[in-house]
Image (cartoon, rainbow, N blue to C red):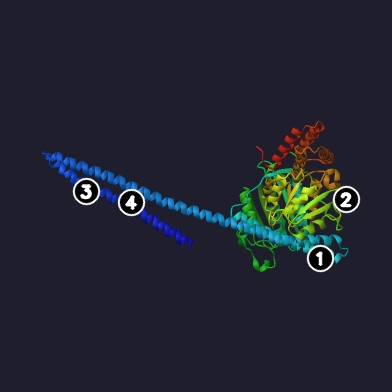
Amino acid sequence: MGTDSENNKQQKHLSRMIYIYAAVFAAVVIFAVAGRFVLGSYIKGISDPQAARNIITFYYCVVVFFSIIVLIVDLLLYRFSVMNLKLEEENRAIEVAQRSNQAKSEFLANMSHEIRTPINTILGLNEMISRETDQDSIYEYTEDIKGAGDSLLFLINDILDFSKIESGNIEIYERRYGVAELISNINNMIAPRAKAKNLEYDVNIDPNVPAGLYGDKNRVQQIIINLLTNAVKYTDKGSVTLQMTWDEDVRFLRVDVTDTGKGIKEEDINLLFDKFRRVNLEDNSNIEGTGLGLAITKMLLNKMNGNIYINSTYGSGSTFSVIIPQKPAGQEKIGEYQKPVRRKKKFSHLFNAHDTKVLVVDDSQTNLMVVKGLLKGTGIDIDTAINGEECLNILADHEYDVIFLDIRMPGMSGNEVLGQINRRGLRRGVPVVALTADVLAESKDKFMSMGFSDYLAKPIDAEALERMLIHLLPAAKVNVLDDHEENGGEIEFGQVRGLFTHLGGYVISHNDEALKSMLGALSNYNFPGAYQEKFEAIKASFEIRDYDNMNEIVQSAIRELSGDIK
């Protein structure tokens, strides 16, 4: 109906324009004929016939000339009107497309929130059961639930990412990151899957790979995990191998994923990157997945100016090789990489922090219960609020060391609540963490730009929650337990920004006591590359209480870590 109405309007407009142009042209013709009669009366008094003919000829030439000018002007105006209508039509089409994309993005965000919220409850309660049970059979059940939940999340992320990439809304966010941290994240996701299928999982890292790189860590990680996940899914026995090398001349990271699985028929290789396409269905009908993993991988590589190559022998296995342009972040090399020893079956907290207070704000009572359950035994005093108004009322009367704030709440949203906290002076330099189901790569930058100190994705990963609190709580109140001390000696790139942001809050508020405590605790750690020098400079400035210099160093480091450098 809307399109028909627009077309009718265009037709009426063009008809009116034609009538106007015809009327103008008719007026010119009438004027020319009337002028001829007037001119005829005038030339009757001229005795020279040749002169009379010359006058008449000149008159007709003028009339023809002006008629042509009027005709050209009419045609140009008509052409302009048609072009203007087409432009208006294109603008309307663009607006409709933009509204459609916006509606799709909002739908996906809503669906992500609605799906992740119950999964957060399921996996959170499952984690608590896993911690508290003494029965091996129940522990095995919880491991199966966790594996199924992680698989479901992986499928959700595929759909969200594919939609963002296809609509052109996805961006590459480059910043410094640690390669060891990247590999550790990948291993934590892939090793359990390989173990569940009794596969050997080998990791070979070239010692010459830079310790730190500059690029989009989340997308690099996603590409490698997609390849490894496929390798594990399509391999029934044998091994899956991850190999990483660095080409210093052209500065790209090469990743090879080799499996001893089913292999791919030569005629099917070109079909692998088709969206929602599953090749060799007769052999792979029982394989889970959306059929989007490799399509997403190819799209991301195109976005990053990378490439992918496939070498496969049907029945023997495959090797997927990707080339990803990255920049080295410093001269340090990763050296001999050793796979970390995985945590023992028996659960223990990474830290305790008595005399600390945390406020958690979420409109879901079960989410609040999950956070409290995950932190039970850490010594943290946890208060909760069910909405933004309650949060503001609590903060008016109480102070906290960290605030966790859900983004999507009825009434005031999380970012609106944060704005009120800042305007009312209730923050007092305290870190505020966004709790969100929005897990796209650009999410962290979005929340940081809103003024949040960090963000934590739902479903909440218990270890990620604890590691975040280790760095956000006042250092003097945090006791990292002996079993986990080895994790704290070397600070990875991914942790540096949060630490400097936390320091910045104390510097801006001139919180002398908190600064002294945090600087003392961090002195036992090693920052990567040039950030150790910046940290030492901050300590030196603190000795003479030069807050201006401290703030300049901190802000400079944060800008570098955010990629905002010249």
The mark closer to the camera, 4 or 2, is 4
Q: Residue flagged by tag 3: what amino acid is it? A: Val
How many numbered callouts? 4
Residue tagged by mark 4? 21
Mark 2 surroundings: few (<14), some (14-19) or many (≥20) residues within 10 A = few
Mark 1 surroundings: few (<14), some (14-19) or many (≥20) residues within 10 A = some
The reply to whether discs 2 and 1 touch (Cβ–Cβ < 8 Å) is no
Tell me the element at label 2. Answer: helix
Q: Residue flagged by tag 4: what amino acid is it? A: Tyr
Mark 3 surroundings: few (<14), some (14-19) or many (≥20) residues within 10 A = few
Indicate the position of residue 450 as horizontal and vertical percent values: 68, 47
Q: Earlier in the sequence, mark 2 or mark 3?
A: 3
Is residue 42 visible in the rendered structure shown here? yes
Give whichever of 30, 224 is nearer the camera: 30
Q: Which mark is residue 483?
A: 2
Q: Earlier in the sequence, mark 2 or mark 1?
A: 1
Q: Is residue 211 above or below residue 314?
A: above
The residue shown at (25%, 45%) is 64
Residue tagged by mark 3? 33
Tell me the element at label 4. Answer: helix
Q: Earlier in the sequence, mark 1 or mark 3?
A: 3
The reply to whether discs 1 and 3 touch (Cβ–Cβ < 8 Å) is no
Q: Earlier in the sequence, mark 1 or mark 4?
A: 4
How far separated are the C-alphas under marks 4 and 2? 89 Å
Give whichever of 104, 22 is nearer the camera: 22
How far separated are the C-alphas under marks 1 and 3? 100 Å
The residue shown at (86%, 55%) is 377
The residue shown at (34%, 48%) is 74
Q: Residue 10 sits in which quadrant?
A: bottom left
